[in-house]
Amino acid sequence: MEILAARCSPIFLILLGLSSLCFVAGNLVVIFADSLTGALPVFWVVWIGMAIIGVAQGLVETVINPLAATLYPDDKTHKLNVLHAWWPGGIIIGGLVSLALGYWGFGWQARLAVVLLPAVTFGFMVIGTKFPPTERVAAGVSATGMFKELGRPLFIVLWLSMFLTAASELAPGQWVDIALTRTVGMKGIVLLIYVSGLMFLMRHFAGTLAHKLSPIGLLWFSCLLASAGLLLLSVANSPITGLLAATVWGVGVCYMWPTMLASASERFPKGGALLIGLMGTAGNLSIKFVLPWMGNIFDETKIRAAGGEAAFKALTGDRLNEVLGIAAQTSFRVVAILPAILLAVFGAIWLYDKSRGGYKAETIVLGGAKS
C-alpha cells in the first residue's frame, strides 16, 4: 500500500469529475424538459437527459470498482460488497426523501432535484484528491498482458454468467414493486425501501460468508435463493407471502453483482480495470435483453388471461388488477430459470476449486512487493 500511496493516477479524478458534471446536467435537462422543448419533442429531451445520467452512472462504476480492488487487494469480495451496499443505501435515502416530499406536496421535479445535492458534493470532494494507480498499473503489467486475460476460458465463463446474474437481480427488480402492488396490495415504494434495506444490511456480511464458502460458493447459494424467491413471487397472493418472497429473492440477489466483480478481479488481477469494466458492461447489457423479454411474456400472458385483446381493453377495476397480477407472476416464474441455470455452472467451478485444494485468489506483485 505504501507503493500505491507514493504514486497517483489523474484519470480517476477526471472521470469522477466528469461524472459529477453529467449527473448535474442530465438531471437539469430532465427537470426542465418542458422548457427545453423546441425542435425536439419532450420525449427526446427527456431521453437525452436520461442518457447523460446513464453516462454519469457508468463513469462512477468505471472508477469505484477498480479503485476498491486496488485499495483492498486481499479483501476484494468483502470491500466490493460493502461499497455496493450503498447502491441500495442510496435507494433507501432517496425513497424516504421522495415519500416525505410527496407527503408535503412537492412535485416530481423537486424530488428529482434532490439528486443534485450528492452529485455536486462528490464533485467538490474529488478536487485535489490523489488517487492511486490501479493494481495492474502498479504491478507493471502491460496493456498487452491485460488484454491477454480476456482469452482465459474461466473469465469467458464468468463474463457470460454475469448476463444471467444481473438479469436475475436487475430485471425483476424493475417489476417486484409494481407486481406486488397489484397482487398483494403492498405500496411499491415501501416494498422497494424494504428490499433495499435488506440488501444494504446483508452485503456487509459478504466477507464472512465468502471466507466460509468461497466467493463462488456464495454465488451458488445466491442463485439458489434467487431462483426460489422468483418462484415464490410467482405465487404470492397475500402481504405475508409477498414479503416472504421478496425477502428470499432480495437475500439471493444482493451478493451477485459485487461478488461477480470481485471473483473476476481476484482470479484475473492482471486484467485490471478492463475485466472489471467488461463484467459491469455484461450486467448492464443483460437488462437490454431481459426486460423486453419479460415485457413480451407479460403482454402475451395478460391478453391470454383476459380472453383476447379486445377483452383486455375492456377490463377495469379488480378484474384488470387480477389479470395484470397473473401476467407479472408468469414473468417471475419464467425468469426463475436464469439463476437455476447458474447452479450447474457455479457448482462445477466450486467443485473444480475444491479438487485443487480450495479457492485461492491470484496475486500479482506491486513494485516488487506482494499485493
Image (spheres, rainbow, N blue to C red):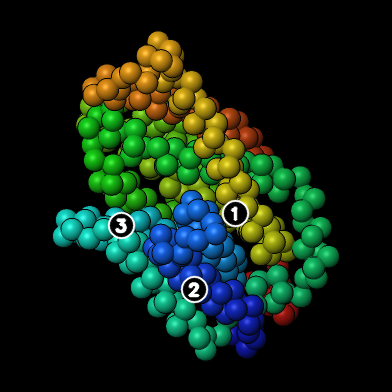
**View extreme (left): residue:** 104
Q: Residue 136: image x %, image y %?
A: 70, 70
Q: Residue 278: image x %, image y %?
A: 66, 55
Q: Which residue lies at the image location 73% right of the left edge and 64% below the top edge? A: 270
**View extreme (front): residue:** 39
- Can you say whether 60 is above or below 348 in the image? below
Total numbered circles: 3
What amino acid is found at the position of numbered circle 2 in the picture?
Answer: Ser
Does dot 1 land on a helix, a strand or a loop? helix
Q: Residue 122: image x %, image y %?
A: 44, 76
Question: Seen in the image, is 370 located left or right of residue 247?
Answer: right
Q: Which residue lies at the image location 43% right of the left edge and 12% below the top edge? A: 308
> Does residue 198 appear in the picture of this structure?
no
Q: Which residue lies at the image location 41% right of the left edge and 60% below the top edge? A: 34
Q: Which residue lies at the image location 50% right of the left edge and 81% below the top edge? A: 126
> Does residue 115 appear in the picture of this structure?
yes
- Can you say whether 11 is above or below 178 in the image? below
Q: Residue 304: image x %, image y %?
A: 44, 14
Distance between mark 1 and mark 2 Cα atoms: 20 Å
Q: Nearer the viewer, mark 1 or mark 2?
A: 2
Does dot 3 land on a helix, a strand or a loop? helix
Label 3 or label 2, whichever comes before in sequence order: 2
Label 1 or label 3, whichever comes before in sequence order: 3
Q: For the residue carrying disc 2, how many other residues have a C-alpha within 10 Å: few (<14), some (14-19), or many (20+)?
A: many
The residue that label 3 is drawn on is 108
- Can you say whether 109 is above or below 177 in the image? below
Q: Nearer the viewer, residue 96 or 55?
A: 55
Question: Seen in the image, is 262 located left or right of residue 34?
Answer: right
Q: Which mark is residue 280?
A: 1
The residue that label 2 is drawn on is 20
